[in-house]
Image: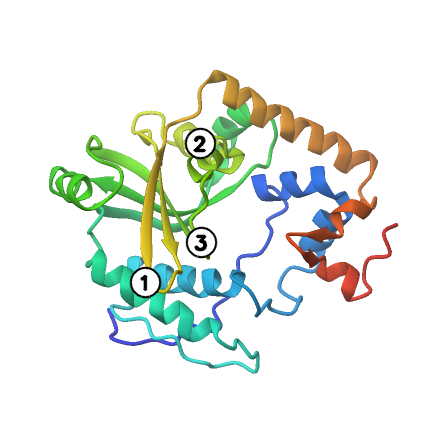
Amino acid sequence: MTTALPVLPLPRHGSSGSGISYYSQVIKCPRKAALDVELAGTMPERTEGAAPVGTIVHQMDELYYGGVCANPAVIQVSDVNWGDAVSEARRLWEAYIKRFPGVNWWGNVIAVEEQYPVGQGQEVLVESVMGVTPFTVRIDRVIEVTTESSERIAKHTDLGYIKPGVYLYDRKTKGKADGDAQLVHFNSMQFAAYQMVYNACHPTDQALGMIVDEIISTKEVKFRQFLVTPPDEYQQRAVRSMITNAKALEKSNACFGVAYGCKDYNRFCPHLTSGVCKRS
């Protein structure tokens, strides 16, 4: 691995138009979902709030755990003014690596930012579980928890003892600790879909769960972890039902704008503010 590498900008993966985030957005506003796919890679970077900090931290994760760079450096290399996001991402990253040092702290890294399914054979397996094709997911990390790393996890995280084996891993960057985080993660259709797809693609070596790793950007950086178990029959049915409804809405109202979706989390939709979307 190299010792230092610029992080910004890395290519953004953007909306695939065939994943759980896309279908969830179709339910909220079909017009925004369509524009997200159509304009992927051309929209201005969002540089205010917590989102850009999370973007940068994810990019550092991809470089570090992907074996590209042992010490990813956040360097301003574009004309985008990232403001305080750069220094804040560096602060969070340094605190995290100090607390959980080493690429294999959680276990052996199997894959980083890998998209599934891969190849026609896996596509058929995923369709049998999700009910649609194509359906894709991009997972932050896949790890194999070893006996040694299981002991570290039990001693230094909120998870306690977890059985050695394959786990999916998702990074979250939060401004504050959400009191309902456990409920939110356990009922997340995203995390359910990730496990459904991965386990369909790996029927003989399935993931035992999904580790959700939160960095809380308080004055003294804090960390929380949650283990989301594989979805049961009812959770899987709920995911398939949502996707089926989204597909029907997509087909009949591909250009329909939903006015109440123009403002989300106190921010206006960028397609509305740019003038691209006229809500029709």
Disc on the earlier residue, 2 or 1: 2
Residue 67 appears in the figure: no
| Whole-percent x, y for residue 67 in the image | 27, 61
Q: CA distance from mark 2 to mark 1?
A: 27 Å
- Point out the image quarter for the N terminus: bottom left
Please state if 271 lies on the left or on the right of 143 as rendered: right
For this rendering, which residue is in front, 93 or 224? Answer: 224
User: Given the image, on which type of amino acid does mark 2 rest?
Assistant: Phe
User: Given the image, on which type of amino acid does mark 3 rest?
Assistant: Lys
Disc 2 packing (10 Å; few <14; some 14–19; many ≥20): some
Say above or below: 194 vs 40: above
Looking at the rendered structure, the secondary structure element under dot 2 is: helix
Query: Which residue in the protein does label 1 denote?
Result: 220
Query: Which residue in the protein does label 2 denote?
Result: 186
Looking at the rendered structure, the secondary structure element under dot 3 is: loop
| Whole-percent x, y for residue 201 in the image | 41, 32
| Whole-percent x, y for residue 170 in the image | 39, 46
Disc on the earlier residue, 3 or 2: 3
Q: CA distance from mark 3 to mark 2?
A: 19 Å
Query: Which residue in the protein does label 3 denote?
Result: 176
Q: CA distance from mark 3 to mark 1?
A: 11 Å
User: Given the image, on which type of amino acid does mark 1 rest?
Assistant: Glu
Q: In the image, which is nearer the foreground, mark 2 or mark 1?
A: 1
Disc 3 packing (10 Å; few <14; some 14–19; many ≥20): few
Q: In the image, which is nearer the foreground, mark 3 or mark 2?
A: 3
Say above or below: 246 vs 40: above
Q: Residue at x 50, y 42 (%)?
A: 137
Residue 208 appears in the figure: yes
Q: Residue at x 63, y 39 (%)?
A: 24
Please state if 120 lies on the left or on the right of 211 as rendered: right
Disc on the earlier residue, 3 or 1: 3
